Image (cartoon, helix red, strand yellow):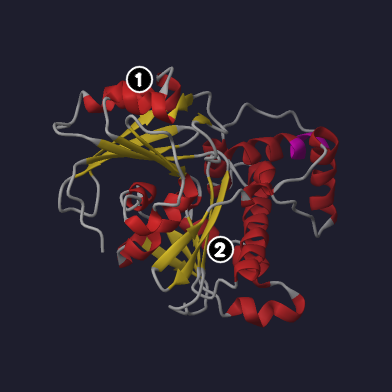
Amino acid sequence: MLVNKLTTLVGDIGGTHARFGLIEPGMLRPDYIQRFSTAHYATLDEAIQAYLAECPSNNLTRAALAVATPVQSDRIELTNNTWSFSISGLCKGLGFAEFKVINDFTALALSIPFLAAEEYCQIGGGYADSGSAIAVIGPGTGLGVSGLIPTPLGWMPLSGEGGHVTIGGTTERELAVFKVFWNRYGHMSAERLISGMGLVETYHVLCGLDNKPPQALSAKAISTRAAAQSCDTCEEVMTLFYGWLGVVAGNLALTLGARGGVYIGGGIIPRLLNELKQSSFRQRFEQRGRFSEYLQTIPTFVITSDTPALLGVAHVFDEKYSHIGLTYKHNNEANQ
């Protein structure tokens, strides 16, 4: 197990919020955690400087960030955020000796083995096989997907963009919704539906199909009205949303052979636990014809920790994870 010998700045940079914390020497969990709205800062550098001005940041020599976008080169462009930055430029500008950047759902996957029992909640049946792969999925501003594979060196995370897989419908109503999306975008990706922006767009599509005037509702307002049963259209949006999440989570479990369980994170589901339990999520997760019994044995969990990605990114300086993401060391080139 890695024990940090240096104070490390850790961050989780999403489409809506940026979260920061410090990993003190000898510690494995972040402290001094703060959340910042990405809309309130023009750049990531400004948000980091605002955090450092409010925390005991003496002797900081390195940083590790989880970002909601593919990490393929020194230049990082956030998928659902206007921020962009250079890893090397940020490292030099902040005066750090080392700067590492990984995908946010890779970081979320890394957190799974370190979650305490009270930091996740099981939905439905099934039993986890401790020696099998684990799947990770989570709707927030977008849809993140990852996984953990057991190896002789320990758990290894998968980096990918599974939120952009093609999704299909199984009912006439779903197909009617999908047709609107197909005509609009030319591709029906899971993220278009199973995300905060998907909730809003599905709401407007349903209003259009039913000839109802839409209101200017946020994703949170839609889920709140659905829970209060004060808006029929909002209720239908959430019914579709939970079902689609079950379909994609089940597909992911089949693809990875995730008998270690499927963990759901992101910014939406953890605050809707009761609604998820009462929805068709688990039914749609298991509904696979000949492989329904296989999926019935796989447990699904909701991560209830507020900052799991920070917990995961705290471990990326462990030598066995040196190949993950990109690392810039001052006076050296970025390397994988």
User: On the image, which quarter does residue 294 sit in?
Assistant: bottom right
Residues drawn in magenta: 205-209
Q: Residue furthest front?
A: 332
Question: Is disc 2 placed on a helix, strand or loop?
Answer: helix
In the picture, the disc for residue 278 is: 2
Residue 206 part of the magenta segment? yes
Residue 230 part of the magenta segment? no
Residue 100: give x, y in percent of width and height: 38, 40
Q: Decide if residue 11 is in sight here.
A: no
Question: Is disc 1 placed on a helix, strand or loop?
Answer: helix
Which is nearer the eye, 28 or 233? 28
Residue 281: give x, y in percent of width and height: 61, 62
Q: Residues within 10 Å of mark 1 (few under 14, many from 20)?
A: few
**According to the image, label 1 marks what residue?**
46
At 46% from the left edge and 45% from the top edge, which residue is drawn? 336
Residue 209 vs residue 145: left or right? right
**Is tag 2's residue or tag 1's residue first in the polypeptide sequence?**
1
Q: Amino acid at mark 2?
A: Gln
Q: Residue furthest top?
A: 42
Which is nearer the eye, 269 or 274? 269
Which is nearer the eye, 136 or 103? 103
Residue 46: give x, y in percent of width and height: 35, 20
At 58% from the left edge and 51% from the top edge, which residue is drawn? 160
Which is nearer the eye, 180 or 75? 75
How many angstroms separate mark 2 from mark 1 (CA)?
Answer: 42 Å
